[in-house]
Amino acid sequence: MKLNPQADQAETRQQLLEAAGAVFAEVGFRNATVREICQRAGANIAAVNYHFGDKERLYMEVFRYSQEKAHARYPLVSETTAATLPPEKKLYFFVHTLLQRIFDEGEAAWHGKLMLREMMEPTAALDFVVTEKIRPMSVQLSAIVAELIGCPVTDARTWHCGFSVVGQCAFYCHSRPVVARLFPEQTFDTEALHQLADHITKFSLAGMKPFRVAKK
């Protein structure tokens, strides 16, 4: 039986993206090597050059691939659904989705870690990350916060509150080793993420109260 060359090439390309994503998330773009990526993918050392050109372009493609996977696995609340929900519920769904993306331990475990590493150790890919991954989430969160506090989405109070919400989510990722030592009972499984999203939502809602603009 003859193999399908196109199918083989597509499979190799995906394996390279998965392997590269894991390596970049673990050690960062600068410390990652093409050799390590190809070894993990079970591919020839020339495969990266054949499919992507070089490590820089592979890195960009990894982010595009990551974005598609994240949207498919943990989509944001659609505009249609959002229109039927109170802002408090929308905030909970936003927080829960973000936590799921960050703490996914399945095949896509490296996706959230990769984005957080890029924010800590920015590369030339940061503009793409902000435009394609972060800005859509920022737009949705700003709209939710604006509805909650009665300010325009462009108001500094709106985006300061939004950053505070995201900061709570990011804390549990960046400080996970410390949290594990201080409170080893804290887990990040499905039920724990629901509870954590509920806490962050309630804490954020309470924190936003002083910024609410009284309706005229």
Image (cartoon, grey):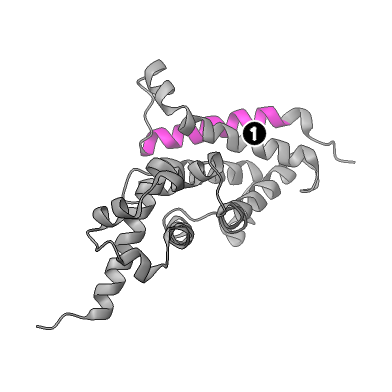
Q: Magenta span has 68?
A: no
Q: Report the residue marked by disc 1.
A: 164
Question: Which of the 4 image quadrants contains residue 51?
Answer: bottom left
Q: Magenta span has 198?
A: yes
Where does the image place residue 204, in percent across and percent down from the top left? 63, 32
Looking at this rendering, what residue extends furthest in the right direction? 216
Question: Which region is colored magenta?
Answer: 190-208
Is any part of residue 155 visible from this angle?
A: yes
Name the kind of residue labelled 1 in the image. Ser
Q: Front-most of 78 and 30?
A: 30
Where does the image place residue 88, in percent across and percent down from the top left? 63, 41
Is any part of residue 100 visible from this angle?
A: no
Question: Which of the 4 image quadrants contains residue 53?
Answer: bottom left
Where does the image place residue 95, in percent across and percent down from the top left? 54, 41
Q: Look at the numbered disc 1 and give the secondary structure of its residue.
A: helix
Q: Residue at x 59, y 51 (%)?
A: 134
Task: Assign the C terminus to one quadrant of the image.
Answer: top right
Give the dominant element type of the magenta stretch: helix, strand or loop: helix
Q: Residue at x 59, y 38 (%)?
A: 166
Above or below 48: residue 39:
above
Q: Front-most of 5 and 203?
A: 5
